[in-house]
Image: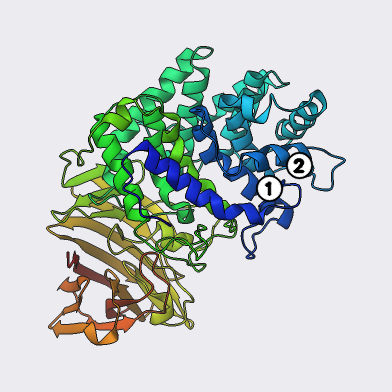
Amino acid sequence: MEKLSFHTREDFVKLLENLCRPLDKYYSDHSAFLQTGYTGTHYGVKITGLEGFSRILWGLVPLWMQGDNSPLDVRVLEGIRHGSDREDSEYWGDFPDGSQAFVEMAPLGFALLFTPERVWEPLSAREKRNLNTWLLQINEHTISDNNWLFFRVLVNCGLKKAGGTYSSEQTEKDLERIDQFYLEDGWYSDGKTRQVDYYIGFAMHFYGLVYAAAMESEDGQRARKFRERARLFAEDFIYWFGTRGEAVPYGRSLTYRFAQVSFWSALAFCGETVFSWGIIKGIICRHFRYWFSLPILDCEDKLTIGYAYPNMIMSEGYNSPNGVYWALKSLLILALPEDHAFWQAEEEPLPKLESVRILRHPGMIIQRNPDGYVTALASGQFVAWNPVHDAEKYEKFAYSSFFGFQVARSYCSIAHMAPDNMLAFYRDGYYHIRRRCDSVSIRENGIYSVWSPCRGVKVETELIPSGMGHIRQHRIISDEDITAVEGGFALPWDETEEVACETAEQQITLTTRRGTSSLRILQGDGKGSSVFCEANVNVLYPRTVLPYFQYHISSGETVLRVYVEGIPAE
């Protein structure tokens, strides 16, 4: 892909063109399905093909809103005609409760809301009835009680705007239910769950702001509420971003990559300037430069499954080769004309932010060191439906925008488990880690949690920001002797000979050309060691080495206090 400056609207138009161009040959004969790869999901082939067709619209619709065209425009209209026709060989299908297909109706609702002249008006009366009937399935079924409710809102509002048949009663019911997910201070939960991650920005607020922009004249009170909540959220969410444009890797669906910044794109789309246009533009443009400095594309310039590089290990069962194009939601800024204040503004750095910031709702304490990278100390989130690697994605002690985090290949060895920023107990041939907390409290100087990794072991942990690192204090109560290991930040390396290890009494320090990672015991006793982790377990780096302490935990009560630090070489 050509190198772009990511500063002007033209740059972002070119990006979308470059991402669309290699897709054309992967459409089905009548364009209703787009299949860009071969790996599977927990839903079938037809729905993944629908997913590919639909998700491209997140980028195309903003482009169309300014009258521009894309290389895929003809494909989209042809696909709608065939995919929504029950008599056609490429009919998208009829679906049961909870189907993934309802997710893929949302971009079509989005298109109907803002660009009916592209996806509705060119259709014949029969074709309009077909599309309307197919979309109305979403009103006839139970869908997930979380951000999915916004999909039904988008579909019904889109049909209303286009002049189709819709349900105002269902829309009102869904919006009232969504309102019940609101916490405080701009934060939602994604349904009635303890999961508070990027879905709050790129789903709950993104759709709320889209609704505010589209329906303001008809539902001004709710539009104002969505805007106000987004402004509050922005004041906290900005802490998740580093000075170089990267965001803290945390939670599920990380393969959506630059969707992380789509909240800021939606904020700009709605004209909300909680920060200056230059600051918002800087966040977005640096974010894109960061992502497109990384190997996230294949040899055809298609987006891959993974995070900072192609990586199936960290992906979830709903991540298809087509689903990654959810990232195009961040291109909502293309809906802004070239003379808009956003495009005319000069980029500004992040505003002056607190070096330590408590984020009560996601259960985090954010540390911003002078190097501009971000570390989130975390406790308490839990995803009850258990997406793959949920413990690693939500329950580590710390997440870093430089060091990333790691996902296990197995729990039989330290190298496979790769337990960065975790305390793991070895019992019955397996390592047991923190998967959920029994209780959590955030205090002025730290996060306190109570958890149990396995039978007979209870742990009270306090995470305390300290200097360039943090302190972990554990009070462990065990009903028998047991071995435990505790990892620091995983350190990237390119060649094994560059890894230097220095051990002293109750301390271990690893150094590579990328930086330094160290642990020091302040109270208790342990043996310092290191391990070359299984390849590709880290979301940012394919090769890592991990410093850790091994502890002998005697039956009864044991107190450990450890200082943990990671310093990037930059």
Q: For the residues labelled 1 and 2, say whether their Cβ atoms are less than 8 Å apart.
A: yes
Which residue carries the number 1 mark?
50
Outermost residue on the right side: it is 87
Up/down of 215 relative to 343, above or below = above
- What is the x, y in percent for residue 531? 32, 83
Q: Residue at 54%, 38% (x, y): give it.
A: 60
- What is the x, y in percent for residue 93? 78, 44
- Quarter of the image containing the N terminus? bottom left
Q: Nearer the viewer, residue 418 or 385?
A: 418
Which residue carries the number 2 mark?
83
Q: Is residue 247 visible?
A: no
Q: Is residue 368 visible?
A: yes
Q: Give residue 433's quadrant in the image.
A: bottom left
What SS does tag 2 mark?
helix
Q: Nearer the viewer, residue 15 or 113?
A: 15
Q: Residue at 51%, 28% (x, y): give it.
A: 67
- What is the x, y in percent for residue 243? 22, 49
Disc 2 crowd, CA 10 A, few/some/many (<14, 14-19, 20+): many
- Left or right, 390 with reference to 424: right
Kind of residue indicated by mark 2: Gly
Up/down of 41 relative to 212, above or below = below
Up/down of 511 relative to 255, above or below = below
Work out whether mark 1 precedes mark 2 in sequence or the reverse, and give the earlier one.
1
